[in-house]
Amino acid sequence: MPQRSGLAFAGTRDVFDDLSIRWLAGQAFGLIALALCVAGFASKRDDRLFFLLLFANVAFALQFVMFRSWVAAAIAALIVLRIHLVRQYKGHVAIMLGVMAATAIAALFTWSAPRDAWALAAGLIGTYGMFMLEGIPMRWLLAVAAFCWVVSNLLVGSLGGTLAETLILITNLVTITRLYRASP
């Protein structure tokens, strides 16, 4: 059987081609998430923030799948559900605890390395902030969660995700400042 390269036989994909496709797809999903998140965090309206975060977290979940970071992918997917539930059940402790339990269970079943702790922390902190807080206090906890996501993205090698979460963190801090200035 003729060889295409030193790593694969004809009819199969070259390992490096597959890695490049996954890597590029991961970066593309990270950049899509970036655009959606910056638009959301730039808004002073919580409902618009939540709406844009729904779609951004679909992109983040797909990004983490491409990087085979299963805890982060599972938690990003759960964030889509969390945002939907928060819009209907904001302030409900039992539902918040259910989402936190689902987050912990997802991490338990997909855990692969200590780096997964950053995604777990981001998921839990963000869940509390979104369910129990509003406005500036919510955005402060979401800023902490964004920092955890920055670290998680750095550890999996996601350029797009790291840039996205860093800009989310900065945009969120700017919006917090705008909200402080606008308050009486």
Image (tube, grey):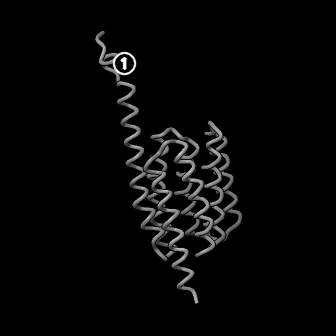
Q: Residue furthest bottom?
A: 184
Q: Quadrant of residue 13?
A: top left
The amino acid pointed to by label 1 is Ala
Residue of label 1: 8
**Which residue is nearer to you in this view: 168 or 89?**
168
Please state if 23 lies on the left or on the right of 141 as rendered. Answer: left
**Which residue is nearer to you in this view: 162 or 100?**
162
Q: Position of residue 110 (x, y in %)?
A: 61, 39
Q: Position of residue 82 (x, y in %)?
A: 57, 60
Q: Position of residue 107 (x, y in %)?
A: 64, 44
Please state if 65 lies on the left or on the right of 144 as rendered. Answer: left
- Label 1 Cα neighbours within 10 Å, binned few <14 / some 14-19 / many ≥20: some
What residue lies at 40% left-to-right and 33% top-to-bottom? 19
Numbered disc 1: secondary structure: loop
Q: Quadrant of residue 3?
A: top left
Q: Residue furthest top?
A: 1
What residue lies at 65% left-to-right and 53% top-to-bottom? 121
